[in-house]
Image (spheres, rainbow, N blue to C red):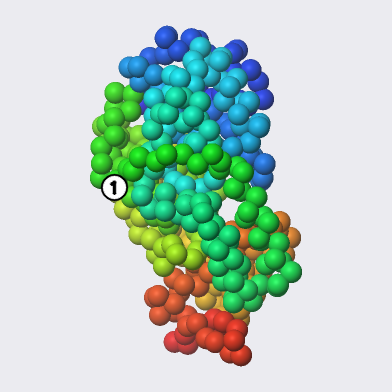
Amino acid sequence: MDSKRDRTLDSNMNRKAADEADSIEFWPTGEIRRLRVPLPFSLRYVNSYVIKEAEGITVIDPGLHTPEAEEVWESALAGWGAGFTDITRIVLTHYHPDHYGLAGWMQLRSTHAPVMLSAEGHQQAKLLWGEGHDVYIDEHVKLFLAHGMDPDLAAQMVPHMKGFAAQVSPQPQVTYLREGELLSMGGRTYRLLHTPGHAYGHLCLYDAEARVIFCGDQVLPQISPNVSYMPHSDPNPLDSYLSSLRELSELDVAMAYPGHRDPFAAFGKRVRELLAHHAERLAFVEAGLAAPASGFAVCRTMFGDGLTVHQMRFAMAETLAHLVYLRSTGRAVELERNGAKLWRAVQG
């Protein structure tokens, strides 16, 4: 396993990929290369992975569609002695724009390599960025308003969310991946694991023999993945997330390739840390509900006030996910007073 880890090349977006790698014909089949694709927000970059096939390459999670990301991909492929036409398949762990956004652009450049995503993930992508997406964005805003968000702040969510449309265009033609399906990549066999919670229809790719997992954003080192309650999506995303973490904790993993930060070995330990983190978060939220409070008030208690609009959208959706979970487990109730939705802990 260590030799495979050593062979994994990390291509830094701040230097020429041409200085880092040999021509594609000299890649060993199965070699995994990481490309850090830049993001225009605090995460800074998303990890894309490129796997050498017997013929061509597979790309996992190409990134957000920005001019900077296009430049990074063009430079990296040229430096590797490859081109877009060498891309034979684009695999997406989930539909979030920082993973999905470049898929359509790359599909066209590759002469129509299949873009592979779960049906549930594609459904969400179409709701957010397909025809009628304005209606879906309005539903997000109404949800936040119903739970006490300041109207001026909620109004800023509309142009913010609409701004992602350009960063996921053109939309790809999608081939569906299914839970339990086996996918051959680089001469290895990966089982597709349905791991919802962070994203509706999220998939991890697990090779039991090599003890390797591509975990998308479901398990991240150092960062706690966002878990959002959204309209027309998972009705209890935190329950789904915790359940999938418990299933992942049973896997034998020697190396995990995440969507953000560095690949890491202590997968099981990190899963347990995330489970403990959410148990603590839930206890914290429950303790703050001795008196009825709006979801927005709980959000400000959890995350503070110094957030950007981008950060606040995720913070509010994550707060609602925790409140919905507490309601589902009988630890909190949702009230309605004078048209406003409030939450209160169930007294023991």
Looking at this view, is 149 or 344 the one in front? 149
Using residue 199 as the reference point, say whether residue 188 is left or right of it. Answer: left
Nearer to the camera, 13 or 104: 104
Q: Residues within 10 Å of mark 1 (few under 14, many from 20)?
A: some
Image point (53%, 62%), residue name: 136
Q: Secondary structure at mark 1?
A: loop
Judge whether residue 256 can be spotted in this image: no
Name above or below for residue 150 compared with residue 168. below
Residue 329 location (% of width, % of height) = 39, 75
Q: Is residue 327 above or below residue 39?
A: below
What residue does disc 1 label? 179
Residue at horizontal 53 percent and vertical 36 percent from the top: 102
- Residue at 49%, 29% (x, y): give it: 108
Callout 1 amino acid: Glu
Q: Is residue 288 visible?
A: yes
Q: Is residue 182 left or right of residue 223?
A: left
- Report which quarter residue 87 is drawn in: top left
In the current view of this chain or complex, which residue is farthest to the front? 131
Position in image of residue 63 (x %, y %)? 54, 37
Q: Nearer the viewer, residue 228 or 245?
A: 228
Q: Residue 230: percent from the left, percent from the top?
A: 50, 64
Q: Is residue 184 left or right of residue 240?
A: left
x, y percent for residue 98: 55, 43
Tell me which residue sits at (58%, 60%) in the image.
134
Question: Seen from this angle, which residue lies furthest bottom?
Answer: 338
- Residue 162's image quarter? bottom right
Q: Quadrant of residue 155?
A: bottom right
Q: How many marks?
A: 1
